[in-house]
Amino acid sequence: QVQLVESGGGLVQPGGSLRLSCAASGSMFGIIVMGWYRQTPGKQRESVAVITNDGITNYADSVKGRCTISRDNAKNIVSLEMNTLKPEDTAIYYCNAVTSVRNYWGQGTQVTVSS
């Protein structure tokens, strides 16, 4: 079992920045990929950024150049630095961990970009 706890969401003005963090605990040895996803009402959950155990990253086109995902393996923390935020970035952001047998999700953290 893997437990994921997100933090760092909140209200920010357009053009602002936020840093989301995900603290992972439990059976960490089986994790292959970790990432951040987001979801708005009425829409499917979408990938924002992912990072492999080897540090390979992948970003959604909508956030490329504005977001950076990082992983501290010693502390079991995955972070998402978001800059130049836009109103369309408003969503609930979920931390995700993938093992060979299942996906794990955090409870989500709300990000609202509004003036």
Image (cartoon, rainbow, N blue to C red):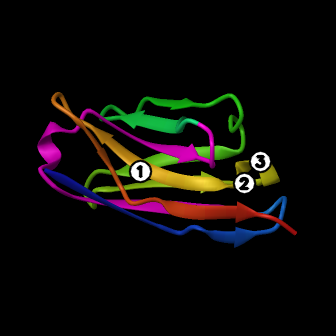
The CA distance from mark 2 to mark 1 is 18 Å
- Identify the element where label 2 is drawn: loop
Q: Is residue 27 magenta?
A: yes
**Mark found first going from the N terminus, 3 or 2:** 2
Q: Which mark is residue 95?
A: 1
Residue 52: x, y in percent? 35, 33
Specify few, some or many for label 1: CA neighbours under 10 Å numbering under 14, 14-19, or 20 or more. many
Q: Which mark is residue 46?
A: none
Q: How many marks?
A: 3
The CA distance from mark 1 to mark 3 is 19 Å
Q: Where on the picture, by quarter, is residue 24?
A: bottom left
Question: 58 or 102, which is in the foreground?
Answer: 102
Q: Which residues are magenta?
A: 17-43
Question: 72 or 89, which is in the foreground?
Answer: 89
Split into 4 quadrants, where in the image is the C terminus? Answer: bottom right
- Identify the element where label 3 is drawn: helix
Q: Which mark is residue 88?
A: 3
Question: 63 or 106, which is in the foreground?
Answer: 106
Pointers 3 and 2 in contact (C-beta within 8 Å) = no
Q: Which mark is residue 83?
A: 2
Q: Amino acid at mark 2?
A: Asn
Residue at position x 76%, y 54% from top? 85
Eye-nearest disc, 2 or 1: 1
The CA distance from mark 3 to mark 2 is 13 Å
Describe residue 38's horizontal placement relative to residue 50 as left or right: right
Specify few, some or many for label 3: CA neighbours under 10 Å numbering under 14, 14-19, or 20 or more. few
Q: Is residue 9 visible?
A: yes
Q: Is residue 45 magenta?
A: no
